[in-house]
Structures are given as C-alpha cells and as structure tokens.
Amino acid sequence: MSESMKRRAALASVIVAVSIMAGCGPKPPSVLLETPAQLPADLGEKKLFHTPQAYIYARDELAAGEMDRMVKDVASYVKRKHGRELGKGLVLIMDPKDAPIAATIEDQLVLERDPSIMVTKPRHAKSPAEVRNRLVDEGIPEGPSILAASVPLPTSKCRELGIGGTQAKWAVAVPSNELAQECAVEITVGALRKKRPDLPEEKTRSLARSLSLSKPFEVGRSIPIYVYWAQSQADWTDGQRIEAIQRFIKYTFRSNWLPVPSDDELQW
C-alpha cells in the first residue's frame, strides 16, 4: 500500500471513530408528521417519511433519517449565508433495484436544464456529446455515472412519478448509499481498466472495492437541492445565482475533505 493510501485509510479510521464516539451513526428522522392526503404513503417498495423539512421516499427509516439531516444542513446554510428559508421539499432516494430516473446522458441533462427550474443557465454547459466523450476518454461507463448522479425533479416529472400532488418548493432524486457504492465500484473499475489494462479483472475489482470512492456521490446529494433553491430566488440576478451556486458546491466539497472541482468541471 502506498503512503498516500495509508494516510487515507488512517484518516478514514479516525473519522469513523470520532463519528461513533459522537453518536453520528445512522438514525431515523427525529420527528415524523402525518402523511399528507395529496401524496401516496407508499411508492413501490418505498415509504413516505414526512418530516418538518421534507417529504422523503425511502426504503427504510435510516436512509430517510440521513437524508433528513442533509436537508437540515442545506437549510442551515441557506439561513446562515442568505438569511432566507430553504422551504419544504421532496426527496426520492433511489436504490439499485429501481428503474432509473434518467437512462442516458440526454435524459439527465433534460432534468438538470429544465426551463421551469433553470432560470440561469450554466456558463460552461457541456453538450451530451462532450460529456460522453469525456467519460470515454477516462474509461468511465455511462450507466453507473448517471445512476449515481443526484438530479432535480421538475413538477412534470413528479406528476409522472405519481408524487406531484404536494406544494413542495423543490424536489430531487438522489442515490442511496448502496447505489452510490455500487456505481462507484463500476466507475472505478472502468477508470482502472483504462489506466492499467494489464491488471487482471479480479484484482481490478478488488482494488476498486477497497478504494471506496462513493463519497463524492453521497456528498453531492445536497447540491441539486441548493441549485433548485438558488434558481428560485426571483430577486437575484444571473450573476448572483451563479456565484452562490459556485460557493455552495465548493463549500460542500471542502467541508467533506474532498478535492474542489475546477470551474470547468463545475460548469457554472
């Protein structure tokens, strides 16, 4: 094991130990409210967990609790930085068994750039071909990269999914931890095959699993929530929205000990 990998493993051990001592393990939502008449109590195998912050569709209460705390964190940031309210939203937590919300890069970009949400367009928006070419260049499979992405859900998409009956201020679909981890392994395997085609398949997969690179996808679940909110600030200019979104994304990665994306990668 290289020195950098040893340092990463040591840091991860410290973080886990501190989390356990601080009682930061998975927990159900601290407060649950009655199911509103406008929304189904169940969506396939998912149940609705109605909290003061959001309507959360999840397979279990621990996943719902984790997402509820993330929404609280975004709301706290909005209040602290802007003196405004995030408002109540809807979260659909996607699992490996679920049919994908977006099956192609084109599908994903349609959701991310829906004109009913995206008042201000990204300054460096990439075309589907540009996104796909970059994935190919890096050896990253398209399917897992899409499944691991968190995306906004326009009102029309919510209606299509049967969850459009509420007055949520925002709505997003995000990967569960299990889905993020599965996709991260496949993405890492693809990248390793590109860089080290000499490695046996079994060793490539073993290395991909040991690296456990799902954190960016898990941390990134908060980003479309904030982007959705920022785009809804009618008194902001395009420049103010772009600057606020850039700051939040960089803050999110820094505060989670992750490399900050370049401006080109941010697209904003």
Image (cartoon, helix red, strand yellow):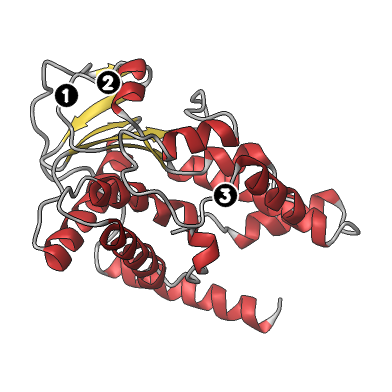
Quadrant that contains the N terminus = bottom right
Q: Residue at x 75, y 48 (%)?
A: 136
- Tell me where residue 123 appears, x and y as whole percent: 45, 57
The crowding category of the residue bearing disc 2, from other C-alpha atoms within 10 Å (few below 14, some 14 to 19, many at least 20), is many
For the residue marked with disc 3, what is the amino acid?
Answer: Lys
Earlier residue among tags 3 and 2: 3
94 up-or-down from 245: above or below:
above
In-image side of 86 versus 213 (left or right)? left
Q: Residue at x 59, y 50 (%)?
A: 184
For the residue marked with disc 1, what is the amino acid?
Answer: Thr
Q: Residue at x 74, y 50 (%)?
A: 190
In-image side of 13 versus 162 (left or right)? right
Q: Nearer the viewer, mark 3 or mark 1?
A: 3
Tag on residue 149?
none
- The residue tagged with tag 2: helix, strand or loop? loop
Residue at image mark 3: 126
Is residue 11 visible in the rendered structure shown here?
A: yes
Q: Residue at x 51, y 57 (%)?
A: 124
Residue at image mark 1: 166
* Viewer-nearest residue: 186 or 28: 186
- Tell me where residue 197 appears, x and y as whole percent: 88, 56
Asked if disc 1 and disc 2 are in contact, CB closer than 8 Å, the reply is yes
* Viewer-nearest residue: 135 or 145: 135
- In three-dimensional space, the C-alpha distance between marks 1 and 2, rounded to whole angstroms, equals 7 Å
- The residue tagged with tag 1: helix, strand or loop? loop
Is residue 205 visible in the rendered structure shown here?
A: no
Tag on residue 163?
2
Earlier residue among tags 3 and 1: 3
